[in-house]
Amino acid sequence: MNFKKLTSIFIIVITFFSCNDDKKTTQSPLVNGTTITLRNTLTDGFPETPYPQLPLFVDGLSEGDFDEEATLSNTSIEFATALKQDNVNFSPVPGTVPPFIVNISGLYKIDFTENSISFELLPEESDSFWGPAVFNEGPYASGKFDRYYFTLSKAHNIKGFTSNNPAVNLRLDSDTSFVVELGEGYEIKPGLSFTVNLN
C-alpha cells in the first residue's frame, strides 16, 4: 500500500471520528452557553399565579418582575439563590396585617449541566420568611403545584427524563421551554435535594 493511499485512509478515519464527536455534542439534551430565563408560579387552591403576584406581595407587581436569567455552564451554578428578593413589600395576612419590607433568601440552588438539572433546598427551618411558609406543611396535596418555568435561547433536545423524586415531573412546552413541576406528594424538609436527569 503506497503512502498516498495510507494518507487517504487516515483522513477518512479522522473525519469519521470528528463527525461522531459533533453528533454527540448536538445530541445533548441542553446546549452549553444557552441563556436560561427562570419564572416560578404556584397553584394551591387558586389559579396558577406567578411568584411576584401572590397576595403576600402587596406592590401590584407584574408576573415577570422576579424573573431570573443565567447562562448554562457545566462548570458553574446557574441559579445559586433562586427566588431571592430584596426589599419586598410583604404582608403575611393581606388586608389584615399591615405590609412591611422583607429580604427573602433564596429557596433553591439550581444547577444545570447539558444532561441534568439539580435542585438543592437552601433555607433552614429557622429562616424568617421560608420557615413559616414552606416547612412543616406536609406533603403537597393533589392539585398543588410549585412550577419552575425555564425558557431557553437555544432549542433543547430533550426526549425524556428520570428523577430521583417521584413527586417531580418535567413538562415540555416547546422546543425552547420546559417546566419542572413539584406536585402531589412533594414535601419540603431540611436537606432536601433532587435531580432531573435528561435524555
Image (cartoon, rainbow, N blue to C red):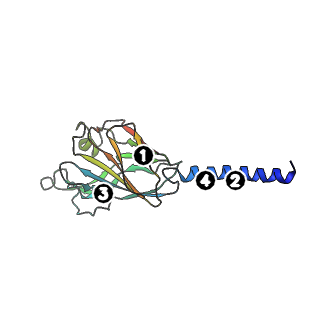
Q: Earlier in the sequence, mark 1 or mark 2?
A: 2
Callout 2, which amino acid? Answer: Thr
Q: Residue furthest front?
A: 1
Percent position of residue 100, x then y: 22, 55
Disc 3 secondary structure class:
strand
Q: Earlier in the sequence, mark 2 or mark 3?
A: 2
Task: Give the residue number, with chain letter if any, for mark 4.
Answer: 22
Q: Which residue matches tag 2?
A: 15
Q: Is residue 101 above or below residue 134?
A: below
Q: Which residue is mark 3?
A: 87
Q: Residues within 10 Å of mark 1 (few under 14, many from 20)?
A: few
Badge 1 is on which residue?
A: 160
Secondary structure type for disc 1: loop
Label 2 Cα neighbours within 10 Å, binned few <14 / some 14-19 / many ≥20: few
- The reply to whether residue 174 is visible in this rendering is yes
Q: Is residue 51 left or right of residue 150?
A: left
